[in-house]
Image: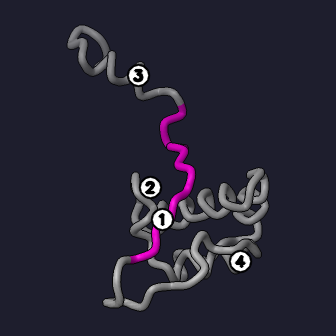
Amino acid sequence: MAFFWLSEEEIREVHRQRESQNRLGYALQLCTLRYLGFVPDDLQATPPEGVTFVAEQLAVTPPYSQRTPAGDGPRPTISFPYRPTWDFGISRPLTGMLSNPGMGC
């Protein structure tokens, strides 16, 4: 659970989000970035234990009310608003530069 532990600074940043589901989604993006090295497109693969642990730190209710034990049917559906925080608006200029051999290095 070390990857899902939020520092006080991270919690302050997360609390800048308006809605509780946005705070939880943003915090899970931080945690998966630290754990995996990238933010996956689908946060539904986040272990329910991790979601619950982060939700408890933020004092918010997880997006599902009851966990499904492993092997007892489908996993609960978890949906979070996803915002690609890694883009910073530079992907288009880089793409154009890389597709034009006369520019760049």
Left-right relation of 43 to 28: left
Q: Is residue 42 above or below residue 82?
A: below
Q: Earlier in the sequence, mark 2 or mark 1?
A: 1
Residue matched to label 3: 92
Q: Based on the displayed image, in which of its 4 quarters is residue 98 positioned?
A: top left
Q: Which mark is residue 39?
A: 2
Q: Earlier in the sequence, mark 3 or mark 1?
A: 1
| Measured Cα–Cα span from mark 1 to mark 4 | 16 Å
Q: Please rate how many residues cluster around mark 2, counting C-alpha atoms within 10 Å: few if below 14, some from 14 to 19, many from 20.
A: many
Asked if the stretch drawn in magenta spans residue 80, the answer is yes
| Measured Cα–Cα span from mark 4 to mark 3 | 37 Å
Residue 102, position as x, y percentages in the image: 24, 8
Q: Please rate how many residues cluster around mark 3, counting C-alpha atoms within 10 Å: few if below 14, some from 14 to 19, many from 20.
A: few
Residue matched to label 1: 32
| Measured Cα–Cα span from mark 2 to mark 1 | 6 Å
Residue matched to label 4: 57
